Image (cartoon, rainbow, N blue to C red):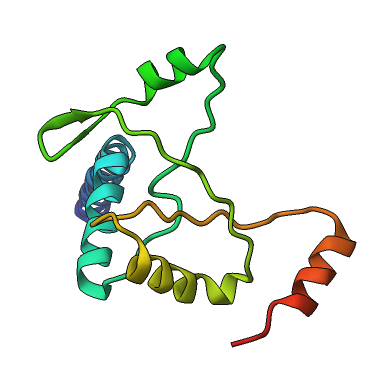
Amino acid sequence: MECLIQRCHKEAVFCSVCRSVLLLLCLLLFLSVSMYPGLWSVGVQLRSALTGTYVPGHHSVLLVNSPNEQTAKDIGRYYWKGEIQDASEILMLVKTKTSRIQQVIDYVRSVHPYENPEVLSFPVEDGSLAYMKWMDEAIPDD
């Protein structure tokens, strides 16, 4: 009889420990899911600081249509050094191989009059095979 009581006690303790562990795992999962955006952002900043590299997907570029030039100017005002800027700029589309992006960025920074020129890269996912073949032939490898 005493052996049976000890066995029941051990099983009760085991079940209690299992419930506690399960509750702790559920709480950890809940906190991880609810804090994911903040943790991801901290992780991105930490990786950038430690490696000096950019983490893809952290920023986005939007293409915005406007009905006229004035609306585009109104939307396009931006802050720079504490003041609202309303500059006219010309957008250049530069096509190159992904392996050459850093060379293009370095060149643009060396000749551009802005202290911090906007240079962004978008990978080509699909397109005219003939055109991409021409680019491969026209743009030398590193």
Closer-to-camera residue (36/59): 59
The residue that appears at 51% across and 70% down in the rendered structure is 101
Instruction: Give coordinates of residue 102: x percent, y percent.
Output: 45, 73
Looking at the picture, does residue 27 appear above or below residue 41?
A: above
Closer-to-camera residue (90/75): 90
Q: Quadrant of residue 98?
A: bottom right
The residue that appears at 28% across and 54% down in the rendered structure is 114
Q: Residue furthest bottom?
A: 142
Give the side of residue 50 with respect to residue 95, left or right.
Answer: left
Looking at the picture, does residue 107 appear above or below residue 37?
A: below
Q: Residue furthest left?
A: 82
Q: Quadrant of residue 52?
A: bottom left
The residue that appears at 52% across and 25% down in the rendered structure is 64
Instruction: Give coordinates of residue 130: x percent, y percent.
Output: 89, 63
**Is the C terminus in the top left, top right, bottom left or bottom right quadrant?**
bottom right
The residue that appears at 27% across and 66% down in the rendered structure is 47
Instruction: Give coordinates of residue 124: x percent, y percent.
Output: 67, 56
**Residue 23 appears in the picture as rendered:** no
Q: Residue furthest right?
A: 130
Closer-to-camera residue (20/141): 141
